[in-house]
Image (spheres, rainbow, N blue to C red):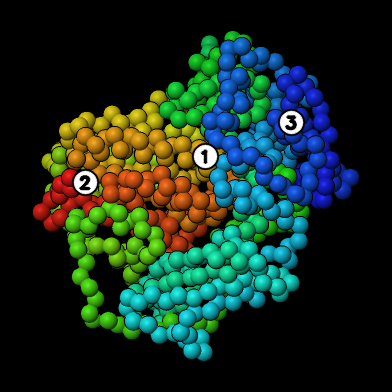
Amino acid sequence: MKPWTFLNGNITIQLEHSKSKDHHSEATQNSKTARLHILNSDDSKTLKDNFSVVRKVTIHDIMNLFHAKTLDTCSNQCETGRESLCSAVNASDWYTLLKLGNFQVIPYLRKGQYMYEFEKEYMRDPPLKDMRQLPDLKSSKIVISGSDDGKVTCEVPCMLTGRVDLVNGYGQPRRVGGDEVRVWLVDKKTREFRSAGRVTDLNNGSYQISVWCLWPGISKMHVAVPYPREYIRTVIHQTHLSASRFVLGKFLKNGIEEVTLCWSLPNVPGRPCLCNLTEIVGQSFYCGLPLDKRLSCDDWNATSSTPLLQPINVTDAEGRLILTRPTYDITKFTIPNNLQIVVHKNDNLHYLKSCSETGFNVTWDLSTPAGFWKPNKRWSSLHCSRPEMTKEFVESCLSDTTVWFFGDSNSVRLFNDLTALTHCNGLTNSLWPLAGSCSNRKANMTLRFNPHEMPLYQHFHWTPRLGYKSVADYIRATPSVGKYIFIVHYYLHVTPSHLSVLHSRLRHLRDAIAEVASRNPDVLFAFRGPHVVSYDYNYNHAVGGDSLVKFYVQLLLETFRGLRDKVLYLDGWGMSLAIENSLNHPSDSIPEEMIKTVLSFRCNRSGYVKRY
C-alpha cells in the first residue's frame, strides 16, 4: 500500500458519470494504479500545473450546495462506483478504508475556489516538483543592524532589528514571501531566560526580524523556517480537498446499529444523504445518513475518533516535504549563525502598572512580546505587574464568582491549575470530553468545564452522545447580575477542518460576548490563543497542528477588533515558541501562568476590581 497518491506532471482525470453527476477520477503512477475519487468537481477535466483561482465563495455558499442532501426527499441509495464506501457499516470497515491511500473524498472547495485572500495567494502557485526550490537554510543569511563582526550590544529593554534573506537550493535568492519564519532568543549560559521575537514578511524572500533585550548576559538568536511557502500551499490544498480527519458516528435503535462518517462540514463522504445535527451540537455538524431504513438521524448515539487520512493529490516532492516537516525539534530547521547578543543591565526601568489597572487592549498587541521566561519556567509579564498568587488573594479574587472553561484538554489543564489554587472540590467525574464542576463553599466559588462543540477527537472507543449546547449559547444564557469569568479555547479539534469552521465559531462567540458584556459589567471574558505544536503531525499536517496558525490569528484579531477592550487575550504562541514546544500539551508552566494572568487582570491585592 502506498503511503499516499503522488501526481507527477499532468494527470488526465477520467470521468465516471452517475445520476447525481458526481465525477470520479483515476490516477496512475509507475504501473501501479491508485484510485482517487474527487466528487462534486464538475469543472475538472484535467489536473494541470496551473492552479488558477477564479471565484471567491462563502461558507454559506458551500452549505447551500449540500443542502439537498439533508432533506427528507434525498434518496439514500448507493450508486454505481460507490460500493466501497457504502459497504462500510461498522468502525472496522471505516478504519480499513481510511488508512488506504485511495480514500474517496468530496472536496470542500472546488478547483479555482477560495474563501480567504491568503488562500488565493498560495493556490496561485503550482504544486512543488523540485525540492531544490525550497529554502536552503545553510546558505540563508541573518543580518542584525549594528552588529560588529557577529557581535551586537544592547541594553535592557532595547529592541534589535535585522533581516533574514532566504536562498534556495540552487544558491539563488527566494523572490517571494509566504514562508513561516520564527525567531526567539535564549540565554546562552542558563538557557532558561527565553523570549519570542517578531517577524514581518517583506514579500520578496526576505523577512524583517525584531527581538528585545530583556535580561543581562549573552543571548543566542534562533531563526527557524519550519514551513516553507510550498508546504503551506500543500496544507491549504489538503484543506480544500478535505483530506483531513473525520469522526465516526454510531446510530443505534433496538439493537440495530450502523456507523457512518461525521464532520463539521457537509461534504461528508460515504453516504448519499446526510443527517444535519447542527441544532443538537450548536454549531455545524453532519453525519452520513444510515442506509438501514430502520435507523434515522434521531438515533445518533455515540462518536469516536478515526485514523488520519493520508495526503491526497500531492506530487512526489510534496510527499517528501511532508515526511520531513514538521519535527519534534524545531531547532533542526534553524538558520546556522554565530551571532552574539550582549545585553547590559539597566537600573532605570519604568514602573509597570498593576494588571487590574491595565486595559485588555494591550494583550491583543502582538507587535511586542507579552513577557519572557525566567529560571524555573516563571513568566515575567511586560504588560503589567502581577500580585503574588497566595491562597488568600485567590479566594478573595474569586469570591462569589463562577469561572467557566470551554474548550478541549488544554482547557481542562487551565481548569486543573485553578482548582489547585482554589482548593476546589466536589468534582464527580474525569473531565474531557465530559463536563464537570467543583466548588469552594468558603469563598462561594464555582469552577466549571464544558467541551466545545463537535468535532471532538476524544478516543478510539465510543463516547456516548454529549448533550451539551454551543459555547456561544452557554455564554448568552449568562444572567445580567453576578460575577463570571469565561475562558474559551478553540484549536486542535477545530483546525483539522477548513478555517471557515473556526471563523464561524469565533463569530458566534464574539456576538454572544458582545451581548452579555452590554448588560453584565461583572463578567470577564478571556480567549486562550493557539500554541506552537508540531509533534504527531509529521504525516499530514492538514489534520491539525500549527502550520496555518498565522491565518488563524489574523481571523481572531479581525473578529474581535471591536471587543478587544472587553476580552483578555492569552497569547500561547509567544510563550510556547520561546520554550521550543512541539507537544499538543505544552509545558505545565504555560497554563499555570495563564491562570495567574487572568486573576491579575481581574483583581488587585484587595480583591475584585470592577472595570465598567
How far apart marks 2 and 3 lie (CA) works out to: 60 Å
Residue lying furthest right in this view? 31
Tally of numbered discs = 3
Residue positioned 69% across, 53% down in the render: 125
Instruction: Give the crowd class for mark 1: few <14, some 14-19, many >=20 residues within 10 Å.
Output: some
Q: Is residue 148 left or right of residue 258?
A: left
Q: Is residue 432 left or right of residue 309?
A: left
Residue 493 location, x and y as percent? 49, 41
Q: Which mark is residue 500?
A: 1
How far apart marks 2 and 1 lie (CA) works out to: 39 Å
Provide the secondary structure element on which disc 1 rests: helix
Q: Is residue 180 above or below residue 409?
A: below
Provide the secondary structure element on which disc 3 rests: loop
Amino acid type for the residue under numbered disc 2: His
Q: Is residue 564 above or below residue 164?
A: above
Residue positioned 35% across, 55% down in the render: 364
Residue ID for mark 3: 42
User: Which one is closest to the eye, mark 2 or mark 1?
Assistant: 1
Q: Nearer the viewer, residue 213 or 559?
A: 559
Residue 295 location, x and y as percent? 57, 13
- The N terminus: image quadrant: top right
Residue 455 location, x and y as percent? 50, 34
Residue positioned 44% across, 27% down in the render: 281
Instruction: Give the crowd class for mark 3: few <14, some 14-19, many >=20 residues within 10 Å.
Output: some
Amino acid type for the residue under numbered disc 3: Asp
Q: Which mark is residue 423?
A: 2
Residue 435 location, x and y as percent? 35, 33
Q: Is residue 494 left or right of residue 27?
A: left
Provide the secondary structure element on which disc 2 rests: loop
Q: Earlier in the sequence, mark 2 or mark 3?
A: 3
Residue positioned 75% across, 23% down in the render: 21
